[in-house]
Amino acid sequence: MNKIKITIDNKPIEVDPGTSLLKAADTVGIKIPTLCYLHLEDLNIENKPGGCRICVVEVAGRRNLAPACATQCLDGMIVRTNTMRVLNARKTVMELILSDHPFDCLICAKSGQCDLQKLAQDLGIREIHYKGEQSHYKEDRSPSIIRDMDKCILCRRCEMMCNDFQTVGALSGINRGFMAVVATAFEQDLVKSPCTYCGQCVAVCPTGALTEVDHTNQIIRLLANPKKTVIVQTAPAVRAALGEEFGLEPGTLVTGKLVSALKQLGFDYVFDTDFAADLTIMEEGTELLKRLTNYLNGDKEESLPILTSCCPAWVNFFEEYFPELNDIPSTARSPQQMFGAIAKTYFADKIGVDRKDLVVVSIMPCLAKKYECQRDEFKVDGNPDVDFSLSTRELAALIKQANIDFLTLPDDDFDSPMGESTGAGVIFGTTGGVIEAAVRTAYELYTGKKLEKIGFEELRGMAGIRQATLDFDGLPINIGIAHGLGNARELLESIKAGTCSFHAIEIMACPGGCIGGGGQPLHHGNSQVIVARQKAIYQEDASKPIRKSHENPYIKKLYDEFLGSPLSEKSHHLLHTRYFDRSKTKVIIKKEQE
Amino acid sequence: METTKLKRVDIIFAMEGIDPIKVVESTIKKDPDTIILEMIDSGLKGRGGAGFPTGLKWKFTRNEDSYDKYVICNADEGEPGTFKDREILDRVPEKVFAGLAICGYTIGAREGFIYLRGEYNFLLPKLNEKLVAFNAGMKKIGLDFTIQMRSGSGAYICGEESALFESMEGKRGEPRNKPPYPTVSGYLGKPTAINNVETLVYAFMISRIGVEKFKEFGTKDSRGSKVFSISGDTPKAGIHELELGMTVQQLVEEFGDGDTKAVQVGGASGGCVPRKLFKDTIIGYEGIPTGGSMMLFNSQRSMYNVLHDYLEFFTEESCGQCTPCRVGCQQLLKGIEAVKRGEKSPSYLDDLKKLARTMKVAAKCGLGQSVANPFVSIVTNFKEEIIY
């Protein structure tokens, strides 16, 4: 391919055709500031509406300024990124954005992590010359996400994630002119929209317009209450990301410090969701084998593929958009809910605490988990199996508030019995992990043989849709994997159209799986952060002495002492669920027609 | 300075002895490249206001290698003070259709669309009826070309060509990043020639009367004539087809009420010419280009009110996508209100002018970029009226 030669700030550069001015400048150390632009390179996610106009530059021969993010390099271009005209325009644009933005930075949830705040500092804004009106909108509070559109700067990143990447279609630009804002259809509350609470809008919001519902104060109060036994479970993806909140490199595993911190915070027992992930594999893996056997025996009632069901945003998604497929996903509850159900029965009995006095808190990389734990089907007499779900970010805030110096914490171990887990439980945190964990167990149960190689490299990676055929001792098993709901939709549509056939499919709503969840430390547009977390997850798996769920001795004990066997009546009651038609859009359209 | 005398012309609405389908039939006997050369030679420029050479637009679209190409007639006539396209579509729709067909043949498009302003939907039944006959006519003469109507929903921004494509594709009407230009990637991402209603009729008439006849009108830089929408303080409000190249002075002498103090040329997004500049301002691409709107204001009018109206219009009609336009329009509006009320000192107008000039270079599309035209010209020339 012929290279394109251009000059940026008097530096000659050669780039491939199609390269943007922004990327070209970056190769020679010129960092053009951006705001609405977002590029998660490893995940193929890009937002460049050219809307904020912060990245404007001077292109010789062009009458007006050009947005560097959305302007391609053309041979012979002469570009200046820091002329008076550019700096003036950039500052004026920034002043305009700030003129319509609340000034409550000191008490904003995003303070310190806000892209707008940082840019205002970098541009040296000390005064706002224009004092027009400010937009005011009603705060919208859902079980997971808070929308404070007063702080929206119309970067449209959330809209791109919601519509293009997730194909959920909950958020889009509405109204015109100064009244333009990102909102749901008919400006309904988020709870009445098709929102899945995946939280990817929150993960990319550059300001405090989209944040998670904060439960830290409730937790502090409960921890101080001597009448309550407060136990905590931590999801696999949290340990691969929490360190970032304390300045550690992305991909630093902090499992031991995480446990220490939780104990110092005062949790009575510190457990691991990985334990419940192993339990999920026992149930889901057995279910897979049962359905597979039925299918192979010619049972017409049996429909494959089996779809994983541990991702709550994914569950919300198919209940909204594919309710006709409600019988296809595994009935296994997610690890968070399995943990809660076992904790408030088996474990509560063991320590002799009434379930009403036992508080189960989960630390999740996820915002949809906040909604999931409030679902009615996961409550007993109104008492939820999991009382509160906190994001990785909220945990970091709790640790900071408790004056804990995270970096100097010694490593500690999870408590027993629900803190023991295998490598299979750990890899739940990444795309491809759940199905790999399931396959490790299903293979051995189906063939009766021991796996020679535990890692299934063919299931790993970052491609949005992946497929592999595994050899189950002569039986070819077709596995599909999708992360991102748009990719999931594509896969589901091809199943409905009958253009592909799988035995089992893993679906995760967030890019990269839970490691890229909406509750994780903010990646600020750097997808390498998510890639590094994935590496850390596989590293933790490799270091585990036991790497197959069915070999977890505490899981065996749980079945021996309490559940009996996978898919037993007790298991069904405690560890499985059913799905509902929640297609809200249809309901709204129906109402409109009436 | 080459100027012409004010001269009335009758090209657009003339129908006598003209059979549009026959003209298409004889035109498509010519090679497309020949038609393009004729268009370029004629000097016809876009009559929507931007003034891009029509022949070049057709040439660029023709040169694109794509099986699917489109030609679109931009009938989203939303510029305040402009009402010529409505009249053209009402009186001589077949000439518009024929212009589309000639363009379609030239660039290699099999489908044409007319994107009609939402408020003009009352024209739809009649246009659709006439289209059935015209499309049948195209079949008869062996041209693989059909035209369909598309209706807007009342957003000014959808007159911006790329926002118009978005709207046609069923999306929120918002301008795209340019480049790529429509000739490369337009409707459905395919090469698209998008022309104003009036441009298509002139293109048709050039095929009919010949290049030389067309070139007799206008100046070197502004060939031909133009349909003007004259409004405001004038006893002769309405549609007038005039030769290009006259001065504002001549226009005012013909259409003014004897007390004209300013002419807003090109609608709300155009510039305001004060009395002292009438003599030196040519109406044409070498002077002050226009989509045809001429609003005359006499000394009874408050230019503050005029500007205030325009700014209210832009604050509402900005698509809201880019910062300079979304927030800037509102700041300009609130700014002059604050100065008027005395809450801000008159020097604040200089800050606002600076803001308007930033909008001109930093806004994403023509809407935001052109707000500076009325703002700077009115604030500069009628500063006292803004302050007091």
Image (cartoon, coloured by chain):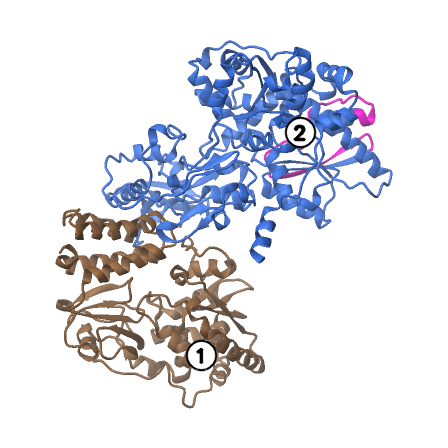
Chain colours: A blue, B brown
- State which region is magenta: A445-474
Residue drawn at (72%, 49%), measured in percent from left and top?
A: A499
User: x, y percentage for residue B299?
Assistant: 14, 69
Question: Pointer 2: what residue?
Answer: A434
Q: CA distance from mark 1 to mark 2?
A: 64 Å
Q: Secondary structure at mark 2?
A: helix
Q: A578 above or below B195? A: above
- Queried whether the magenta region covers residue B272, the answer comes back as no
Q: B202 above or below A363? A: below
User: x, y percentage for residue A489?
Assistant: 63, 44
Q: A125 above or below A65? A: above
| Residue A269 numbered mark, or none | none
Give left or right: position of B275 versus B57. left
Q: Secondary structure at mark 1?
A: helix
Amino acid beneath label 1: Pro
From the viewer's side, name the closer residue of B105 and A109.
Answer: A109
Residue drawn at (81%, 32%), measured in percent from left and top?
A: A290
Res A249 seen here: no
The answer to whether the residues at label 1 and label 2 have Cβ atoms under 8 Å apart is no
Q: Spot the residue most to the front.
A: A381
From the viewer's side, name the closer residue of B200 and B249.
Answer: B249
Label 1 chain ID:
B
Q: Are marks 1 and 2 on the same chain?
A: no
From the viewer's side, name the closer residue of B337 and A69.
Answer: B337
Q: Spot the residue most to the right.
A: A297
Give left or right: position of B354 versus A238. left
Question: Pointer 1: what residue?
Answer: B93
Res A9 seen here: yes
Q: B138 above or below B347? A: below
